[in-house]
Image (spheres, rainbow, N blue to C red):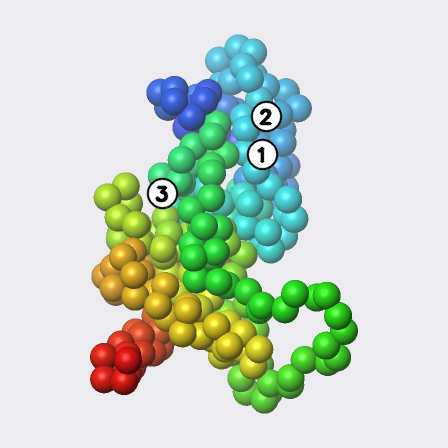
Amino acid sequence: MAEKLIHLIITRQDSPDSTPYKEEFKIPYRPGMNVISALMEIQRNPLNAQGQKTSPVNWESNCLEEVCGACSMVINGRPRQACSALVDKLEQPIRLEPMSTFPVQRDLSIDRSRMFDALKRVKAWVPIDGTHDLGPGPRMPEVERQWAYELSKCMTCGVCLEACPNVNAKSDFIGPFAISQVRLFNQHPTGMMNKHERLEALMEDGGIGDCGNSQNCVQACPKGIPLTTSIAHMNKETTKHAVKKFFFS
């Protein structure tokens, strides 16, 4: 009986400035494999579909349980996590590409710096310096805690940016994930002390005004975060802030 094989077509790039190319691989099938385990098989035995020795495919992963967001890539035309992409549920040949929204470092590995720069821009953290014991933090009502937990699931994976048509080389749009994080930290009992600074950041170029409301982000998010609800809420909050600033500044 012929051995069952997995057929992969991988878009590769040897350096940030080199030309992308496609390389095909055929590896032995095992039940329960995901895309990461397929890439690990290529790493163990880097032979392409023609049986020629090649360099191992470069990619990123960490937790392997859809928590870190590092293994984001485009799988069969859809941005998603490679760790949760099961081979048995994918049409073959399986096509793997790096996300086009971000600069490619090598093969499937990308530079997600624009996401972390966006989080810095909107101060997506609770500003406590930790130099002395402040005691227990303020308690949140259970209803607020529950929806705040949903927003806190963001793993900065970049899938929402890849799916968003407003994020491209001609746009500085910070993306839906950052807008949602502003909502999270502006409603936090301690984080709200920087509420106006975050709203001001959202009102700058590349902020919430650049959202085209395509709603691709909420469909693509692997964590099911209500991104469009957050965008609508922050639209209201920035409008209120602008009106108050106009009349009372």
Residue at the limit of the structure toward the front, as seen here: 249
Sequence-wise, which precedes: disc 1 or disc 3? 1
Give percent across and percent down for residue 180: 43, 67
Tell me: residue 133, above or below residue 16.
below
Tag 2 near tag 1, CB within 8 Å: yes
Nearest to the eye among marks 3 and 2: give it.
3
Which residue is found at the position 70% from the left and 66% from the top? 130
Which residue is found at the position 45% from the left and 50% from the top? 117
Tag 1 near tag 3, CB within 8 Å: no
Give percent across and percent down for residue 112: 47, 43
Amino acid beneath label 2? Ile
Instruction: Identify the disc placed on residue 216.
Output: none
Amino acid beneath label 1? Ala
Instruction: Identify the disc placed on residue 101.
Output: 3
**Label 3: which secondary element:** loop
Instruction: Identify the disc placed on residue 38.
Output: 1
**Label 1: which secondary element:** helix
Judging by the rendered image, the residue that carries numbered circle 2 is 42
Give percent across and percent down for residue 241: 31, 78
Q: Dot 3: few (<14), some (14–19), or many (≥20) neighbours within 10 Å?
A: many
Amino acid beneath label 3? Thr
Q: Dot 1: few (<14), some (14–19), or many (≥20) neighbours within 10 Å?
A: many
34 left or right of 119 in image: right
The answer to which of 2 and 118 lies nearer the viewer is 118
Sequence-wise, which precedes: disc 3 or disc 2? 2
Tell me: residue 187, above or below residue 77.
below
Mark 3–mark 2 distance (CA, rounded to whole Å):
26 Å
- Residue 174 appearing in the image: yes
